[in-house]
Image (cartoon, coloured by chain):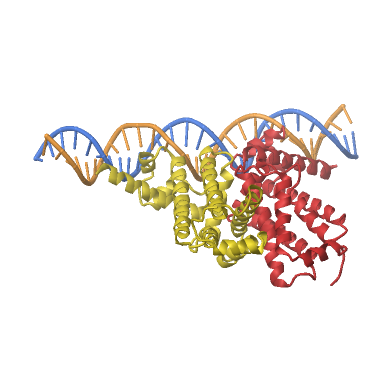
Chain colours: A red, B yellow, C blue, D orange
Amino acid sequence: MRKRIDEIRRAELIEAAHRVFLREGLPGLTTARICKEAGMSPGILAYYFKGKDEVLYAMVRFNNRLLMEDVIARMRQAATSWQRLEAIVEGNFPATAFNRNVATAWLSVCAATNTNRNYERLQRLFHRRIASNLASAFAGLLDKRRLREASLSIAGLIDGLWLRKAVGDDIGREEAIATVLRNLVALLSAEEVDALRRRPYGFAP
Amino acid sequence: MRKRIDEIRRAELIEAAHRVFLREGLPGLTTARICKEAGMSPGILAYYFKGKDEVLYAMVRFNNRLLMEDVIARMRQAATSWQRLEAIVEGNFPATAFNRNVATAWLSVCAATNTNRNYERLQRLFHRRIASNLASAFAGLLDKRRLREASLSIAGLIDGLWLRKAVGDDIGREEAIATVLRNLVALLSAEEVDALRRRPYGFAP
DNA sequence: CAATAACTTGTACGATCGTACAATTTCCTG
DNA sequence: CAGGAAATTGTACGATCGTACAAGTTATTG
């Protein structure tokens, strides 16, 4: 039973940290507030974690995993390469999460990447996953140069729209998705778009 | 002579704050470090500024103004609408500033926008300027809907590429500019691009 | 050359944070 | 029901930060 209560408490603290993080921002995320949010004593954090940084790391890791799993689930339901691309884009703008607080939180983590090695590793992994997913959807259709161009454009635009959301721009989820997909279509020729739409998932070049 | 030394010291402190900011990040930007960087006593900051926040505000404001003036200077040299667009894009990736530290600093400011009203006002103004510049370059060519689409894509992609730079992605200035311009061309029809290239600056619809 | 204003220094105070730790309570087991 | 391990509490310590302020130095002016 020891293992059980351990993981329960850790999960509770991580969830509490997440709520505080979204409400107070990264500078406002203190150990005392996390414990209070979880309804526990201020000292409890040091018992289940090595320190504050470990909680943060676990929190970011958990949310990245959540987003990734959502994207993967969407991709599994895709029948064509085009639907796979839609799944990637839509998955990167979760309906319940595309708001200013979440965007700001995400931005804070990116900003902290420069000083915190753990964050950097996490972000790098996260970005590689997106690039890998895009590459699989484009597989065999684009050469290396154009794949890089499309990936950078799509991934960059997704991040950019999140950033605009963070600074208060009035962008809706549907508009964000439409904007990315519009750019995606524009970057490809009509024949390429048609090929993506016709090509079933799992197509090997 | 009072006004003179006042502004000199203020400028020195702002410059010192800027250097510390780029080196240590937003969390590492302390009053003591700013003063030490400027070669002054720790208490001097309170004499020339109301507090730390005012220094930060002045610093961001100063750098935004610098970037804006560069963009405007480039736009003045443009002979056609297309060159105006190039000026906007190139001006948003300054050769000496498109590096990871600057990108991280910029990101930190965006992340702080949610809690700091002054930052929010500054960022909002900054974004309006870019939107306004883009609108003037597209004037008469695109209707309201497509203007919004193009502005959101271009401005979002610019911000997104800065974000990728901040998290360590290996993106060069030329590649960033080329990516944005490539998307811009893709979003327009061949006739529209041609019209932009032919149309002299100052064209009235 | 004073004397008054402007400028600069160094320090000290209060607040806040992360963390360690002894004390206390809860829970399980033999 | 004991008794020891696990879990939780509350506090206290050191470090760091922003700011205020008295004291000291420099410059200006009558």
Q: Nearer the viewer, residue B94 or B68?
A: B68
**Position of the N terminus of chain B by quadrant:** top left
- Residue drawn at x 59%, y 46% is B111
Q: Is residue B67 above or below residue B172?
A: above
Q: Is residue A124 left or right of residue B1?
A: right
Q: Is residue A3 above or below residue B183?
A: above
Quarter residue B157 falls in = bottom right
Q: Is residue B188 left or right of residue B197?
A: right
How many tags in the picture? 0
Q: Nearer the viewer, residue A71 or A81?
A: A81
Q: Is residue B128 above or below residue B172?
A: above
Q: Nearer the viewer, residue B191 or A23?
A: B191
- Residue drawn at x 70%, y 43% is A172
Q: Residue furthest front?
A: B205
Q: Position of residue A186 (x, y in %)?
A: 71, 61
Question: Is residue B176 visible in the rendered structure shown here?
Answer: no
Quarter residue A34 falls in = top right
- Residue drawn at x 76%, y 62% is A134
Q: Position of residue D30 (x, y in %)?
A: 11, 34
Question: Is residue A10 visible in the rendered structure shown here?
Answer: yes
Q: Position of residue B45 (x, y in %)?
A: 38, 42
Q: Is residue B158 left or right of residue A55?
A: left
Quarter residue A193 falls in = bottom right
Q: Position of residue A174 (x, y in %)?
A: 74, 46
Q: Is residue B94 above or below residue A5?
A: below
